[in-house]
């Protein structure tokens, strides 16, 4: 059997060879450019993500610092202070009761103020240390006082309030049992528990 002759391809001309090499180089360059662009885009995305994460972390840190600063300014960290603050409990607050008492007193309704806000077991303490116990003690003292003193003028100022009570300043002019007239200045310190006055203590101005 005779061997078949294989047809040899036509040889490329120098111009064709140059064009082929140019196309090959162009494709390689385009491939490299695409690869570089993809890598750059990936790097940019990673950088953006890292920047966002850093900004978020700094924001939390700053917020924590500001919050800590605000808390520090509002409530210093004392070593010897109770964790639980004092309170008057449930019901009307010392502010509400104090405002009502002052308004009623100045309207000439002190009896109404007492019947509205005084606890039945109130302690009423005078400046000399005398303690009148309960509602009956308050009424007994009030009856004696009205029989012996005449109020020529009297005004209540305040209230000055705290978490457990309030203070009221009383000033005016009285006629004493012997008929003489004097200026009167005293303050009443009231303790509130669960919406009622459970203690009142009167203090006179020092002469």
Image (cartoon, rainbow, N blue to C red):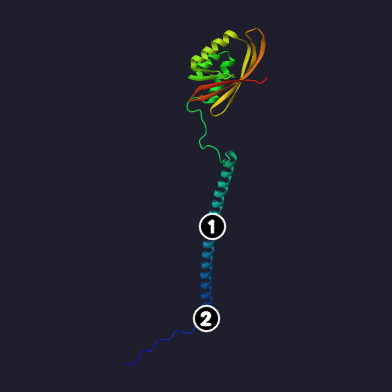
* Residue at (53, 54) in percent of width and height: 53
Pick whichever, 47 or 91, lies toward us: 91
Quick one: SS at disc 1?
helix
- Residue 119 seen anywhere in this rendered image of the structure: no
> Considering only vertical position in the picture, is 92 above or below 144?
below
Q: Which residue is mark 2?
A: 17
Quick one: SS at disc 2?
helix
Farthest right residue in view:
207
Farthest front residue in view:
129
- Residue 42 seen anywhere in this rendered image of the structure: yes
Residue 152, image x, y percentages:
64, 10
Badge 2 density bin: few <14, some 14–19, many ≥20, Cα 10 Å: few
- Asked which quadrant contains residue 8, the reply is bottom left
Pick whichever, 180 or 56, lies toward us: 180
N-terminal of the pair, mark 1 or mark 2, is 2
Q: Which quarter of the image is occupied by the N terminus?
A: bottom left
Q: Which quarter of the image is occupied by the C terminus?
A: top right
Q: Which mark is residue 50?
A: 1
* Residue at (51, 20) in percent of width and height: 123
Pick whichever, 117 or 144, lies toward us: 144
Badge 1 density bin: few <14, some 14–19, many ≥20, Cα 10 Å: few
Farthest left residue in view:
1
| 170 sits to left or right of 119 | right
């Amino acid at each position: 059997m005779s061997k078949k002759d294989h047809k040899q391809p036509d040889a490329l001309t120098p111009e064709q060879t140059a064009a082929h090499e140019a196309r090959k180089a162009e494709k390689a360059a385009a491939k490299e450019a695409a690869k570089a662009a993809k890598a750059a885009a990936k790097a940019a995305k990673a950088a953006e993500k890292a920047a966002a994460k850093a900004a978020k972390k700094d924001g939390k840190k700053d917020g924590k610092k500001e919050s800590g600063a605000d808390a520090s300014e509002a409530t210093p960290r004392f070593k010897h202070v109770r964790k639980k603050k004092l309170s008057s409990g449930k019901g009307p607050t010392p502010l509400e009761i104090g405002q009502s008492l002052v308004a009623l007193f100045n309207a000439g309704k002190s009896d109404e103020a007492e019947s509205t806000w005084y606890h039945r077991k109130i302690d009423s303490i005078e400046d000399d240390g005398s303690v009148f116990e309960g509602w009956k003690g308050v009424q007994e003292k009030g009856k004696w006082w009205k029989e012996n003193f005449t109020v020529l003028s009297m005004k209540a100022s305040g209230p000055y309030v705290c978490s457990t009570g309030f203070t009221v300043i009383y000033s005016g002019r009285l006629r004493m049992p012997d008929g003489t007239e004097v200026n009167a200045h005293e303050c009443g310190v009231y303790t509130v528990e669960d919406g009622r006055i459970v203690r009142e203590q009167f203090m006179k101005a020092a002469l």
